[in-house]
Image (cartoon, rainbow, N blue to C red):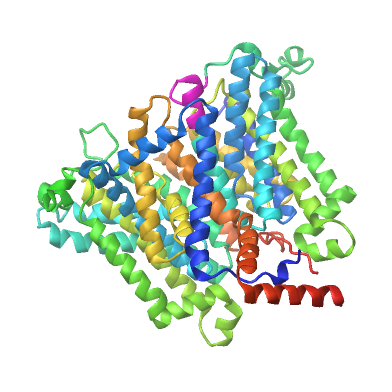
Amino acid sequence: MSSAILKPLPRWADVVLLPILNLALAFIVSGLVVLAIGQDPLAALNAIVTGAFGNGYNFGYTLYYSTNFMFTGLAVAVAAHAGLFNIGGNGQAYIAGLGVIAVALPLQFLPWWITFPIAIVAGAAVGGLWGFIPGWLQAKRGSHVVITTIMFNFIAAAIMVYMVVNVLKPAGILAPESAMIAPEGRMPKLGAFIPWFKNTDVNFTLVLALICLVGAYILIWHTRFGFAMRALGQNPTATRYAGMSNSRIIMIVMTMSGALAGMVAVNQVVGVQYRLVLDYVADAGFVGIAVALMGRNHPIGILLAAVLFGALYQGGNELQYVIPGLSKEMVVVIQALVILFTGAMEGLFRPGLQRIFMTLSPRQKAAAIEANSVKSGS
Amino acid sequence: MDLGLILSTLDATLRLSTPLLLACLAGLYSERAGVFDIGLEGKMLAAAFAAAAVAAVTANVWLGLLAGLAVSITTAGLQGAAAITLRGNQLIAGVAINMLAAGLTTFLGIQWFGQGGRTPQLPVTGRFQNIDLPFANELAGVPILGQIYSELISGHNILVYVAFLAVPITWWVLYRTRFGLRLRAVGENPKAVDTAGISVIKLRYQAVLITGLLCGLAGAFFSIAQGSGFGNNMTAGKGFIALAALIFAKWKPVPAMFTCLLFGFLDALQIRLQGAEIFGIGVPVQAIQALPYLLTVILLAGFIGKAVGPKAGGVAYTKER
């Protein structure tokens, strides 16, 4: 029963089988909850799947949610590769809206393809700043980045309420929101190019999200900096002895992470709402944690996990209309269980799975028997 | 400001610091034992819901409290299983617990009570009533001291007194008992504790379950003492303010009380100041709301003193073989 002799899992089992097992467990537990309150879990699942993929309209909204989750998932993953847990995606995505609206309103009469890149830069700058400060505090002052980013979520929320209500809200409007962006400055919806999507909220920002996924892949595995940050994540002592500046890497990574989260603001402000409203992030930052865990911090995994969670959110919205009594919070429960099982309770399946794989492979089995006999012999 | 206004502000301070203090002491046990807990919020929320749901159905406040405690302790046990036995990431376990509580309370609330996630208004017997301490009415006429006694100290519900009693008890447990010594040791150097033949796992579970108990009291305070029923996300981030207070107090019980009083005072001030002006300038309410978080960031960065947590915090213990 010694865990020392367990061989690591084959790569495909680690990145595909284990996440699927954990996801299945999350679904089963959620299904039991649905069953416990006297509803039919399969009908609920059917309603979610139909609501997410049933037609172009549903799928368009699924992709709209997925766009946000790709950004926040990448934000968590990039930080995780450097050994940092950025729990501040919510705050970074939220405060970035200030940058986006600050350029989108003055430039609103220019064509969208001029506004769009400028909005990206502005959102990335403000979101990046909100990641940089915790990174700087971690690197130079030794504050734990987790605690600082949690605090920054709340500070961002307070600043946003103040800015929207006292600064951005035009006189004569009651609702706490900024002025509307003129139609010229709005991002085109994908439905304008692909009629199948109809008038859903999925817009050009999805393309930006896909570019970010590819960019993150190149950055993490095919650049010197990507190597440095992964090395830092594995062994900070080694990077220091190799002559790298750990604090510099931490600050850059946290800035990039915040900038990625800030892209949620681009999607929401110039792509969907056309104004700055309160609480538009809707906890996408926390969904990003689930997406990154599920996607094993790899862009392809993040893409798939983001679509999965986008589908859950969209399907969850439809669920309450199909089965009265079942609310969309069901999705939050599933998401929490995914985080619990893939992130915190990984030890649930891994040792058992490792044992199964060892018995399946004759060579490993022989090694295990040998190791056991050596152990009992000594 | 006259005495009456000062007293009523301080009175509100005591009430608002109570859940912070309970949650802060809750976090203290767990973190001093080396288990980071960012799931205080979730445990409070779950307890608040369970307490209100049972109190609403049975019209019995004590059964409500018991349900709140049971749910919170169970949740803490789940978190403990992930963080201690399965050696999972403690921070991620906390995130999961917060999310699970937020989702499940609303989901079950809508299903059971059909009021958009709220529980029904509690009957009088389903809530903790304010307690008038002995001679409160007689002493109310005595200037200053009598007023302080009757208006500030007397007239709170039982959980307020429990919270402030928990401070000296925690101090005594932590610094004057064998359990407390071991608890502190296991958060600093679990290997030494293990070498002395004491179970690290058992100690950490004990700490985490105490955390669950105190979070349960804090959660019950929201729904069946201060409030009269559960509302969606009714803990509103107080679990994170409590976490901030814990860091601000450098993981010590008595400073924790003063920090929670300070943060509670800021909260009371913020409610009082809605739209008012101090020193002729309007201070935005949001600035006061953000102050506890800002102060914690500044303290953590070592600009005013230095907050260093338990050394073995956040790391699951693996016994050598």
**Residue B312 spot, x, y in % from top left:** 72, 62
**Would residue A295 be visible to someone looking at this image?**
yes
Image point (51%, 75%), residue name: A247
Judge from the rendering whether residue A280 lies leftward or rightward of residue A232; answer left or right: left
Relative image position of residue A94 (x, y in whole percent): 36, 50
Expressed as whole percent of the image width and height from the top left, the position of residue B183 reads: 80, 53
Count the labels in the image: 0
| Viewport quadrant of the N terminus of chain B | top right
Q: Toward the viewer: A52 or B236?
A: A52
Residue B268 figure quarter:
top right
Q: Main secondary structure of the magenta part?
A: helix
A261 vs A359, left or right, is: left
User: What quarter of the picture does the C terminus of chain B occupy?
Assistant: bottom right
> At 41% from the left edge and 62% from the top edge, which residue is drawn?
A301
Magenta span covers which residues?
A: B105-119
Residue at figure coordinates x 57%, y 44% from the top left: B97
Q: Is residue A159 left or right of residue B315?
A: left
Front position in the image: A127 or B258: A127
Position of A22 relative to A229 (above/below): above
Residue B65 relative to residue A376: left or right: left
In the image, residue B256 lies in the stretch drawn in magenta: no
**On screen, residue A232 above or below A148:** below
Residue sitting at x 57%, y 40% = B42
B165 lies above or below B116: below
Residue B269 appears in the rendering: no
Which sits in the foreground, A2 or A57?
A2
> How far across and how far down the image is residue B114, in percent?
45, 20
Q: Is residue B117 magenta?
A: yes
